[in-house]
Amino acid sequence: MSPSPVPPRPSPAPEPASEPAPGRRVGLAVGHGPIHRAQRELQSRVFELPEGELPAARSWWVHGERRPRAARRASSVAVVRDGPNGVETLLRYRAGPTPLGSVAFPGGSLDGSDEDGCPWFGPTAAQWSRVLGVGDHRLARRHLTGALRELYEETGILLAGPDRFSVASNPGGGEWQQARTALDRQEVSLPELMGRRGFGLRTDLLRAVGRWNSPHFSHRRFDTQYFAAAVPYGQEVSLLEGKGHWAEWLPARQVLAGRDAAAVGDAIGRPDTVGRSLGRLTVPAVELLLERMAAAGSTVEFLMGLTVRGSVPEHTPELQGAPDGPEGGGFNLAVDLPGGQWARP
């Protein structure tokens, strides 16, 4: 079932505020000057409920609303490149129930070591904290470092280099393989690895996308910052031996064209994916980003369209509907989105 638009929902009335001084602009954009962002009317979109979340949704519906479980901090990175059929992105399969979806972008939970200091190229952690809407530069550092660490562990793509103009060459294999394995086993942290190599993190290559909280009914909840980046020239994707079952570069338009069928699920070929539509395998954040990729003519256009002015939007999908038969087809997720490109299916 494709996400379907419903009538626009007006935003809550804003609190009275003083007008900015003439000529003064407010907010901060990473890589851009401060700018005032006009408030937009919210529009609601409805998405399928990922199949792995069905037991939690049923429990929440039967027992009534209660206090949501605490959410773990996480980061996820949508990696893109240009292809013959438009913008392509790297999708991964995650085994078992996961708040990030069985089909997802690279990402995962933050580690304590992600806060450790290391060379850093790009906006400062304090600037990133305002863009991410977290109000704490240490937490912003954890989200950025965690995003780059998870991306490297899962794919071999490393957004880091010896200076602000360079990135590592072939960091997924060769002499890097042992270091990457040690990072995956938590025998070394990413800041330690960068220090040994004399590298700094290229946070300037990331675009902030949005902050997504898992629905309140989820048994495992994440507070996830989503980012996007272009794959650096000279780097190739590789999965660690024994880690992961499927990862593939796919054109966003192709994925969306078959979202009501089971093209991606069948390609993965796992018992919990075969015959499932895209909405049953992924989360709204992934589908929305795929829509933005499909609408863009190139990776540059896609990434420039993600420029953040002020801070990223924050979303928490809400459960709606009720169980309808053994497949739970009556449940959906509703998300309030700002107008413009994000609200268009």
Image (tube, grey):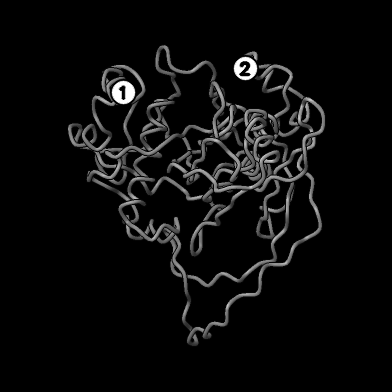
Task: Give residue 284's position: percent from left, percent from top.
Answer: 64, 41
Q: How many marks?
A: 2
- Above or below, 276 against 111 in this view is above
Residue type at mark 2 is Ile
Q: Neighbour class for label 2 at 10 Å: few (<14), some, many (≥20)?
A: some
Task: Give residue 201's position: percent from left, percent from top.
Answer: 30, 42
- Mark number, residue 268: 2
Q: Which residue is mark 1?
A: 180
Query: Residue at image x 30%, y 41%?
Result: 114
- The numbered mark, 2 or 1, whose residue comes first in the sequence reads 1
Q: Neighbour class for label 1 at 10 Å: few (<14), some, many (≥20)?
A: many
Viewer-proximal residue among 67 and 161: 67
Residue type at mark 1 is Arg
Query: Residue at image x 65%, y 40%?
Result: 60
Viewer-proximal residue among 185 and 343: 185
Query: Residue at image x 30%, y 52%?
Result: 138
126 to the left or right of 162: right
Q: Is residue 249 visible?
A: yes
Query: Residue at image x 30%, y 49%?
Result: 121
- Mark number, residue 128: none
Q: Secondary structure at mark 2?
A: helix
Q: Is residue 227 visible?
A: no
